[in-house]
Amino acid sequence: MLNCKELTELVTDYLEGRMSFMQRVSFHLHLGMCDHCRAYLRQMKMTVKTLGKLPEEPIPPQVRD
């Protein structure tokens, strides 16, 4: 089973559906027992959802440089 550090390193793969079946099983087993990692996953989902709502704007030249 995964520990908290391993789970946080795999969150992006989980959210993007890039995990094997066994990785997902280990991921879900850990989530079932760890309140902190469930909260972390909720925060990451909210971050992705919120950032997805931002309008796409070109980068101003002075920032790009």
Image (spheres, rainbow, N blue to C red):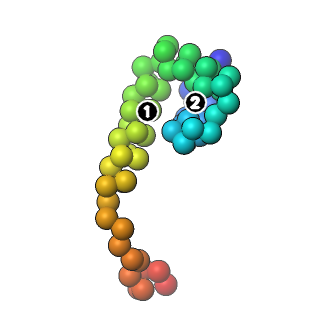
Of the numbered discs in the image, which one, if any, rests on residue 51? none
Residue 65: x and y in percent read: 49, 84
Q: Is 43 situated above or below 62?
A: above
Residue located 51% across and 39% down the image: 15
Residue located 58% across and 30% down the image: 7
Q: Which three-letter amino acid code belongs to the residue tagged 2?
A: Leu
Circle 1 is placed at which residue position?
40
Asked if the residues shown at circle 2 and circle 1 are in contact, with their CB atoms under 8 angstroms apart, the answer is: yes
Element type at mark 1: helix
Residue 31: x and y in percent read: 50, 20
Residue 59: x and y in percent read: 41, 77
Q: Is residue 31 left or right of residue 49?
A: right
**Residues packed near mark 2 inside 10 Å, few (<14), some (14 to 19) or many (20 plus):** many
State the residue lying farthest toward the top.
Answer: 33
Residue located 39% across and 28% down the image: 39
Q: Residue 3: tell me if it is visible.
A: no
Element type at mark 2: helix
Residue 8: x and y in percent read: 55, 35
**Residues packed near mark 1 inside 10 Å, few (<14), some (14 to 19) or many (20 plus):** some
Circle 2 is placed at which residue position?
7
Q: Residue 44: tell me if it is visible.
A: yes
Q: CA distance from mark 2 to mark 1?
A: 10 Å
Q: Name the N-terminal-most of marks 2 and 1.
A: 2
Q: Which three-letter amino acid code belongs to the residue tagged 1?
A: Tyr
Q: Is residue 45 left or right of residue 4?
A: left
Q: Is 46 situated above or below 34?
A: below
